[in-house]
Image (tube, rainbow, N blue to C red):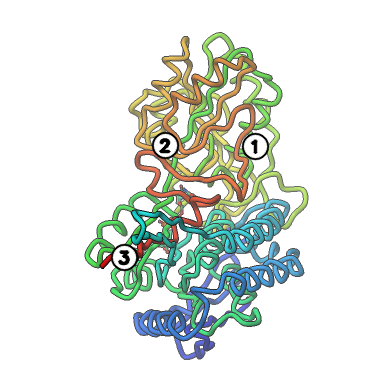
């Protein structure tokens, strides 16, 4: 059991506050104790952030920001193994995935350190004596509220550009993965020359500390990643103080598999991202297979063989092929969807309890594949966020596009075909922020991500991800007499 301390306004919060406990979802053991902060800490963090922006050169000195971000990246690099182990203990994911998640943030932070120095505006001449200059300025105090599934990726994805753009950032990490989040943030607040108060850690539950953040008049922007219901509520509550809100929400991503695709690649890619990676707890998980009717039976039987031997187990055990479901609530939610599926659709494979584990405290779920699903079934329309795949077939590409777009979501999608024209027209027809053609779940610091429809508002990563954390100001110089 590790007990954490958090830094608010440049000071380590004393241990007289209450604590929340984090349970390892693979064993049921308590692994971390996290300070449960109060509304007073939010006030202190906001005031310190506002003061730091006034007193320091953080908002105006891009080289200082780049230097701090590069130090942060170096410190993470030096600690990848220990950080990954803690991530696995709190999240339940496989250690290899945890190492990838932590290691990849170094690349994201370094990209944003470089971007900090590229922030530029534009100027216009409106006549011999009139000039307009448009500059980009930071939003001010930004709160980053992040989820537990890829907790470090999603924290860094928003914090790095927010800092690069010159904002002060208050981080509210998900409670279930707050220990590893605090470790990553400790490496940041210890960086040389980071002005005191520019970064604070606001741990505590979403319904208490999170809600206070959303309604706080001193916070200028909320960058939220999480569930759609929470996102809608945040959007509504933040409106009372007219904050900018960026929302990265859930998905129900279609994976369109054409008969002419490279089947080996398509099937292993699909199985990896819906069943084994984070046990399907990924916002972009390809949870709806749309397969060309002529190959449906073959694809279903190959997928069934693929999941038959999968071994769920603790993420630290090198023999495990799937980790644990991160929270008890999520585990029960997935099991309930599987039970609904057994009553309303055809279970093609999987769906039985994992043998030889204590289900009263270990969150292991076996994958499940359902076919004969009605298009309006909750299995098709709702985000399950687990290793559950639905299969629907199509006869024409128009039908594939119609099915792909037939949910409230529009986060991501995949298209597998070896015909260029089909790849192009399917990609243009699908309403989603990302379409991967003949691959899946590839993220790059350079390319924007975000949702169409109810999957979100705004874009993160890439150039637009940096601009999301800025606002423009037009300064007009007029020297006419
Ligand atoms: P969640 O329940 O919405 O929680 C996300 C964050 O919001 C947590 O830090 C949570 O704190 C906090 N929170 C909860 N209620 C709040 C409130 N009233 N005010 C302010 N903050 C509040 O989501 P989750 O279950 O952690 O994450 C899974 C969801 O995230 C899925 O829907 C998934 O699709 C989505 N997601 C989207 C993306 C993307 O980029 N589009 C990426 C990953 C995940 P507590 O932890 O203390 O409750």
Q: How many marks?
A: 3
Which quadrant of the figure shows ligand 1?
bottom left
Q: What element carries label 3?
A: strand
**Residue 355 locus on image (x, y percent):** 63, 44
Distance between mark 1 and mark 3 Cα atoms: 61 Å
Q: What element carries label 2?
A: loop
The first of marks 1 and 3 along the sequence is 1
Please report contact status of discs 3 and 2: CB closer than 8 Å, yes or no.
Answer: no
Distance between mark 3 and mark 2 Cα atoms: 46 Å
Residue neighbourhood size for the residue with mark 2, other residues' Cα within 10 Å, grouped as few (<14), some (14–19), many (≥20): many
Q: Quadrant of residue 429?
A: top left
* 144 and 295: which is toward the camera: 144
Distance between mark 1 and mark 2 Cα atoms: 21 Å
* Picture residue at 60% right of the left edge, 52% below the top: 324
Q: Mark 1 points at which residue?
A: 272
State the mark number for residue 4: none
Q: In which quarter of the image is the N terminus?
A: bottom right
Q: Name the residue under label 3.
A: 478
Residue neighbourhood size for the residue with mark 3, other residues' Cα within 10 Å, grouped as few (<14), some (14–19), many (≥20): few
Q: Name the residue under label 2.
A: 410
**Residue 112 locus on image (x, y percent):** 60, 60
The first of marks 3 and 2 along the sequence is 2
Quick check: 72 left or right of 402?
right
Instruction: Look at the picture and state if 431 lies above or below 115.
Output: above
Quick check: 11 left or right of 377?
right
């Amino acid at each position: 059991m590790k007990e954490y301390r958090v830094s608010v306004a440049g000071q380590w919060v004393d241990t007289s506050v209450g604590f929340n406990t984090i349970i390892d979802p693979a064993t049921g053991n308590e692994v971390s104790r996290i300070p449960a902060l109060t509304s007073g800490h939010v006030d202190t963090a906001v005031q310190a952030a506002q003061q730091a922006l006034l007193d320091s050169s953080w908002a105006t000195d891009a080289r200082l920001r780049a230097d701090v971000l590069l130090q942060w990246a170096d410190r993470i690099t030096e600690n990848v193994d220990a950080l990954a182990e803690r991530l696995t203990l709190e999240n339940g994911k496989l250690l290899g995935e945890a190492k990838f998640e932590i290691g990849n943030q170094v690349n994201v932070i370094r990209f944003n350190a470089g971007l900090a120095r590229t922030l530029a505006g534009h100027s216009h001449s409106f006549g011999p004596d009139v000039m307009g200059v448009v500059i980009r300025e930071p939003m001010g105090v930004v709160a980053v509220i992040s989820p537990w599934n890829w907790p470090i990726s999603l924290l860094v994805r928003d914090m790095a550009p927010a800092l690069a753009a010159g904002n002060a950032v208050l981080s509210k990490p998900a409670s279930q993965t707050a220990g590893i989040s605090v470790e990553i943030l400790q490496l940041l607040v210890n960086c040389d020359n980071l002005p005191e108060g520019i970064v604070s850690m606001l741990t505590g539950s979403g319904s208490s500390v999170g809600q206070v953040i959303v309604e706080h008049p001193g916070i200028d922007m909320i960058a939220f990643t999480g569930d759609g219901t929470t996102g809608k509520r945040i959007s509504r509550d933040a409106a009372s103080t007219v904050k900018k809100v960026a929302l990265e929400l859930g998905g129900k991503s279609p994976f369109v598999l054409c008969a002419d695709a490279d089947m080996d690649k398509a099937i292993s890619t699909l199985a990896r991202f819906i069943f084994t990676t984070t046990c399907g707890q990924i916002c972009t998980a390809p949870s709806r297979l749309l397969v060309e009717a002529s190959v449906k039976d073959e694809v279903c039987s190959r997928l069934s063989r693929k999941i038959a031997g999968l071994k769920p187990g603790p993420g630290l055990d090198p023999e495990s092929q799937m980790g644990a479901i991160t929270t008890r609530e999520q585990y029960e939610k997935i099991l309930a969807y599987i039970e609904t599926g057994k009553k309303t659709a055809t279970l093609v494979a999987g769906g039985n309890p994992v043998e030889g584990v204590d289900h009263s405290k270990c969150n292991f779920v076996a994958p499940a594949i359902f076919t004969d699903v009605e298009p309006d079934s909750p299995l098709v329309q709702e985000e399950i966020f687990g290793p559950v795949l639905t299969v629907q077939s199509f006869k024409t590409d128009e039908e594939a596009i119609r099915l792909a777009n037939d949910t409230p979501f529009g986060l991501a999608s995949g298209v597998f075909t070896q015909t260029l024209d089909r790849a192009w027209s399917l990609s243009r027809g699908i309403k989603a922020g990302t379409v991967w053609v003949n691959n899946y779940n590839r993220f790059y610091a350079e390319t924007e991500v975000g949702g169409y429809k109810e999957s979100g508002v705004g874009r993160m990563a890439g150039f637009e991800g940096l601009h999301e954390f800025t606002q423009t100001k037009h300064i007009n110089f007029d020297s006419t007499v």
